[in-house]
Image: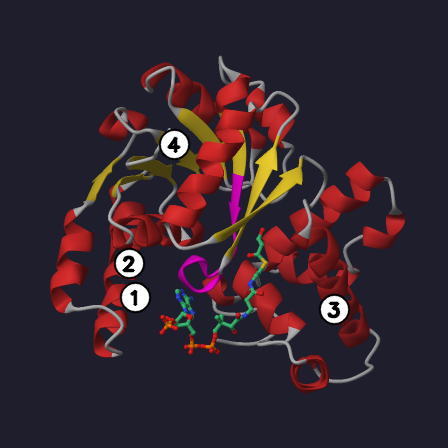
Amino acid sequence: MKVQKVLVAGAGQMGAGIVQVAVVAGLQATMIDVADEFVAKGMAGIEKQLGRAVDKGRISADKRDAALGRITTGLDVSAGADADLFIEAAPESLVVKRGLLENAAVALRPEAIIATNTSSLSVTTLAGFVARPERFVGIHFFNPVPAMALVEVVRGAATADDTVAAARGFCEAVGKTPITVKDSPGFVVNRILFPMINGAAQALAEGVASAADIDTGLKLGANFPMGPLALADLVGLDTTKAILETLERDLGDAGYRPCPLLGELVAAGKLGRKSGEGFFTY
Ligand code: 3HC
């Protein structure tokens, strides 16, 4: 199946990013969230990003306008029930995702694909909330979505081969490189990346170096585009902590336990860029 219309639940940084790359690639997209203000914020972010792309000469103003014209918005799945593909990019809460997936499974055509952008929940568990788990798949984008070339296509226990193929085709159509991954904690990238971020937080907590110097160390000493602490701030410290907790619990390995400093920052509401402060101040 070739995806032409996508319905994205969640207008946060991931959801809006997915909508942006979809419409720039010529697809139709509907973006929904629980309140008008979230939808408006997501749309403003997309308009800002595409405005920058025009200023840099990456796309023409006409192409930008056409892309924006392919977006519709709403407050529930009925706003885009004719979609070929539904992607939930809601907060990492099983309860929230369950409600969304159950509604999508009822509202969408039976042949539509239902996907999750989860980074820390089991795709096979989430597939239990839809009537046709063979049509369910993980489509895990990276942050910031427009700038990151990779997508992990995550095969749950019941995911059918043609669902994986359609998900990979969608990723390629929006300009990304998919890799196919078995449903397992942290998939490939987060399983390897987040222990490194945790190590940076631990080094900071032990006073090995300042946050700025730790990040400079990894940027200049390992050629990372940004340091691990700045990256945690970009991802969100709450999400970072949730991913590490999943790795620790589901792999049964205390080596993944989130550094206490991470928990302290989250408890203090310092969630990174989105709250204005994390390891760094924004
Ligand atoms: N939103 C959208 N686009 C953005 C962006 C943002 N917040 N920040 C940068 N970009 C885009 C720019 O528009 C630009 O696009 P262009 O090439 O078409 O003009 C491109 O990214 C490069 O941006 P800049 O030149 O301004 O900045 P840099 O060269 O410093 O790159 C970066 C910024 C792409 C964020 C780079 O620092 C980077 O790659 N950092 C690492 C990001 C990373 O590792 N992400 C993965 C996190 S883990 C994850 O997402 C998994 C999840 O489960 C938590």
Q: Is mark 3 within 8 Å of ligand 1?
A: no
Whether residue 42 is situated above or below residue 87 in the rendered picture: below
Nearest-to-viewer mark from 3 and 1:
1
Q: Does the residue labelled 1 lie within 8 Å of ligand 1?
A: yes
- The kind of secondary structure element at disc 3 is helix
Q: Which amino acid does label 1 sit on?
A: Gln
Whether residue 22 is situated above or below residue 98 in the rendered picture: below
- Which residue lies under the disc numbered 2? 46
Whether residue 273 is situated above or below residue 18 in the rendered picture: below
- Which residue lies under the disc numbered 1? 49
Mark 2 nearby-residue class (10 Å; few <14, some 14–19, many ≥20): many
Q: Which amino acid does label 3 sit on?
A: Ala
- Position of 127 compared to 79: left or right? right
| Marks 1/2: CA–CA distance | 5 Å
Residue at 49% x, 67% y is 273
User: Residue 41: which numbered mark, if any?
Assistant: none
- Which residue lies under the disc numbered 3? 201
